[in-house]
């Protein structure tokens, strides 16, 4: 085991982690360690297509009020409107920073930033880059900037596997595992920032890449941090459907924003039968419309008909989608695209305030791993990238005012934890691949788009069985074992929270409790708090 000290450790190199590191490096003259478990650019952020919300002063028809209203409407009673206002008001600065760091947003013929529309936005306000490759453009620019920044040290291929928490419940650093050298390093730090992204890999169908295994959520939960709204998982309506299961390529909502329509394989345009807002209804509504249409008529997928979009527009706006579809034998200039829903985004996560503070001193969280109450029960498209940047910016303001001094800590709890990672292995080698398949399938079938108490209880039983057999709570053999350890925690949190919420709201749909309760309430879960649904939205404003 190696030992080191760093002022700040940031875990994750998606937009939240990279932006945090770059912005912080401008404010403090101390070493920042950025740790990422794959290569620098690999993240959910990299695959973002539609774009990022910007409520720009030059877009005269738009306003913060209108954006807040759309966000709150999508959030189905659980969006904190003050948080939404804060994020929206800060969007011009966030966009300005991204441009400053090298992101080139697409422009129209008048050389002005082009704004597009996505479902449930009442106006065009989404900036995009590279046509439909917004995430890739952002990741490339930020990774490039971070690599060139002197006081940022980057560890790639390095996974955070446990947080150091002292006897006073303060976070004092992190234990890292280098998957190439198989070495461990204990890093003592003044602050740890979790920017580890989402959890899509807990489901057998997802738009998320392989890194999205909820590691940060699991790490924070292990040390007692409070989690919020873990039952709210967003299923994107339109993932490309050409193989049975796995990570699926996304067909951006902005394709519907530009006019594409969903039809069933018999050629019937069906979304109006489920909601008058049709193809541009909020994401959860369109997802359920597709789910029920497929279930009722035993379709394996539905079709996205792009024929109403002029070919030149398709070519200009969706080069990436055209390319990937072509690689899979689909020419979207002439054919409809086979699509179906897939797990996409976690609205819940580590409970934070808008400056990234968690319930544990010294531990911060930003991005998809966190829950600021912006997205409520259903996220409005393209609000995620914006939230990552605005919350990270606010966190940096706070951190820049701290002393950020660090020394190795002598603490029995921390020493005991470190000793767990210095042990040798027994002979037992768990069947990680088999457990993964079983876990993902039960989550997709029993804790997915439509839920019931019976199915959720069965899912919890399966998760507990896998946990017992897997039986790895500390040191694991490789990245995949650590990821399974994380996914089992995430699955348990989603299921327990979904069982506790006996109503349907936003993305959480219970067939056995199909009504939405009059009182909007958040759910909280931590190691000390089994699963607790708070009555009354004002409860969220408690200080943490
Ligand atoms: P990520 O970008 O996922 O980054 C997480 C990072 O943490 C990765 O670098 C990962 O390797 C690292 N990591 C994870 N665990 C560990 C560990 N244990 N140790 C070390 N490193 C670790 N949102 C929008 O607003 N607009 C869009 O157009 C949009 N399109 C999307 C399209 C797709 C296909 C997907 C999947 C998501 C999309 N989203 C979109 C959602 C949005 O991209 C994500 O919510 C956002 O990018 C999350 O950023 P993040 O930095 O929090 O996490
Ligand atoms: C999309 O392009 O459809 C995804 C946008 C998002 O998830 O915000």
Image (cartoon, grey):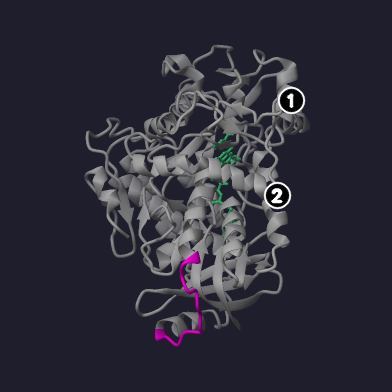
Residue occupied by mark 1: 316
Question: Where ligand 2 lies, by image quadrant?
Answer: top right
The residue under the point 34% across, 51% down is 496
Q: Is 87 placed above or below 543 here?
A: above
Q: Does the magenta stretch include residue 511?
A: no
Is 229 or 34 nearer to us in this picture? 34
Residue occupied by mark 2: 141
Quadrant, the N terminus: bottom right
Is 194 or 449 nearer to us in this picture? 194
- In the rendered view, does 16 fall on the left or right side of 529? right
Count of all numbered marks drawn on residues in the image: 2
Is 429 or 160 nearer to us in this picture? 160
- In the rendered view, does 135 fall on the left or right side of 469? right
Number of residues whose C-alpha sits closer than 10 Å to that of mark 2, classed few (under 14), some (14–19) or many (20 or more): many
Q: Is 36 placed above or below 212 here?
A: below
Give the magenta part as a residue range.
400-412
Q: Position of residue 542 (x, y in %)?
A: 27, 55
Element under disc 2? helix
| Cα distance between the residues tagged 2 and 1 | 22 Å
The residue under the point 42% across, 66% down is 222
Quadrant, the C terminus: bottom left
The residue under the point 63% across, 62% down is 37
Is 40 or 37 nearer to us in this picture? 40
Q: Position of residue 260 (x, y in %)?
A: 60, 19
Q: Where is residue 216 in the image (x, y as percent from the top left)?
A: 50, 60
**Principal secondary structure, stretch drawn in magenta:** loop
Q: Position of residue 434 (x, y in %)?
A: 57, 55
Q: Is 89 placed above or below 125 here?
A: below
> Is residue 237 at least partly visible in the picture?
yes
Number of residues whose C-alpha sits closer than 10 Å to that of mark 1, classed few (under 14), some (14–19) or many (20 or more): few
């Amino acid at each position: 085991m190696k030992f080191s000290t760093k002022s700040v450790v940031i875990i994750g190199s998606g937009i939240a982690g990279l932006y945090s590191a770059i912005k912080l490096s401008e404010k403090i003259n101390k070493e920042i360690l950025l740790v990422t478990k794959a290569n620098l650019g690999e993240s959910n952020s990299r695959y973002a297509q539609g774009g990022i919300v910007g409520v720009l002063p030059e877009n005269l028809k738009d306003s913060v009020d209108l954006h807040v209203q759309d966000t709150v409407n999508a959030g189905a009673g659980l969006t904190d409107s003050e948080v939404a206002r804060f994020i929206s008001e800060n969007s011009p600065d966030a966009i300005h920073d991204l441009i400053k760091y090298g992101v080139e947003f697409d422009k129209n013929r008048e050389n002005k930033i082009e704004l597009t529309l996505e479902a449930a936005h009442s106006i065009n306000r989404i900036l995009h880059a590279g046509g439909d490759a917004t995430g890739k453009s952002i990741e490339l620019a930020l990774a490039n900037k971070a690599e060139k920044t002197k006081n940022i040290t980057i560890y790639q291929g390095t996974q955070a596997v446990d947080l150091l928490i002292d006897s006073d419940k303060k976070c004092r650093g992190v234990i890292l595992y280098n998957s190439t050298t198989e070495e461990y390093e204990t890093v003592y730090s003044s602050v740890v920032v979790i920017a580890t992204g989402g959890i899509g890999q807990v489901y057998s169908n997802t738009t998320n890449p392989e890194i999205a295994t909820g590691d940060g959520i699991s790490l924070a939960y292990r040390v007692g941090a409070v989690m919020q709204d873990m039952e709210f998982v967003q299923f994107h309506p339109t993932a490309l459907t050409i193989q049975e299961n796995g990570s699926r390529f996304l067909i951006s909502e902005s394709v519907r924003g530009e006019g594409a329509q969903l039809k069933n394989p018999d050629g019937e345009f069906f979304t109006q039968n489920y909601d008058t807002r049709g193809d541009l209804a909020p994401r959860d509504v369109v997802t359920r419309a597709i789910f029920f249409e497929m279930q009722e008529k035993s379709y394996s997928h539905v079709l996205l008909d792009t024929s109403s979009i002029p070919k030149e527009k398709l070519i200009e706006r969706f080069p990436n989608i055209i390319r990937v579809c072509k690689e899979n034998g689909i020419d979207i200039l002439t054919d409809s695209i086979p699509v179906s829903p897939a797990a996409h985004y976690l609205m819940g996560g580590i409970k934070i305030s808008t400056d990234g503070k968690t319930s544990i001193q010294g531990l911060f969280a930003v991005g998809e791993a966190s829950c600021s109450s912006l997205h409520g029960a259903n996220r409005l498209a393209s609000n995620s990238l914006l939230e990552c940047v605005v919350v990270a910016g606010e966190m940096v303001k706070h951190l820049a005012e701290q002393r950020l001094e660090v020394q190795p800590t002598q603490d029995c709890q921390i020493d005991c934890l470190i000793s767990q990672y210095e042990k040798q292995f027994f002979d037992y080698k768990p069947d990680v691949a088999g457990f993964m398949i079983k876990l993902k399938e039960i989550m997709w079938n029993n804790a997915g788009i439509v839920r019931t108490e019976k199915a959720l209880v069965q899912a919890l039983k399966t998760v507990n069985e896998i946990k017992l057999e897997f039986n790895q709570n500390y040191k694991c053999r490789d990245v995949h074992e650590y990821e399974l350890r994380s996914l089992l925690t995430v699955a348990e949190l989603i299921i327990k929270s979904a069982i506790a919420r006996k109503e349907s709201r936003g993305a959480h749909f219970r067939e056995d409790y199909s009504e939405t309760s009059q009182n909007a309430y958040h759910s909280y879960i931590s190691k000390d708090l089994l699963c607790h649904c708070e009555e009354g939205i004002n409860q969220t404003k408690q200080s943490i």
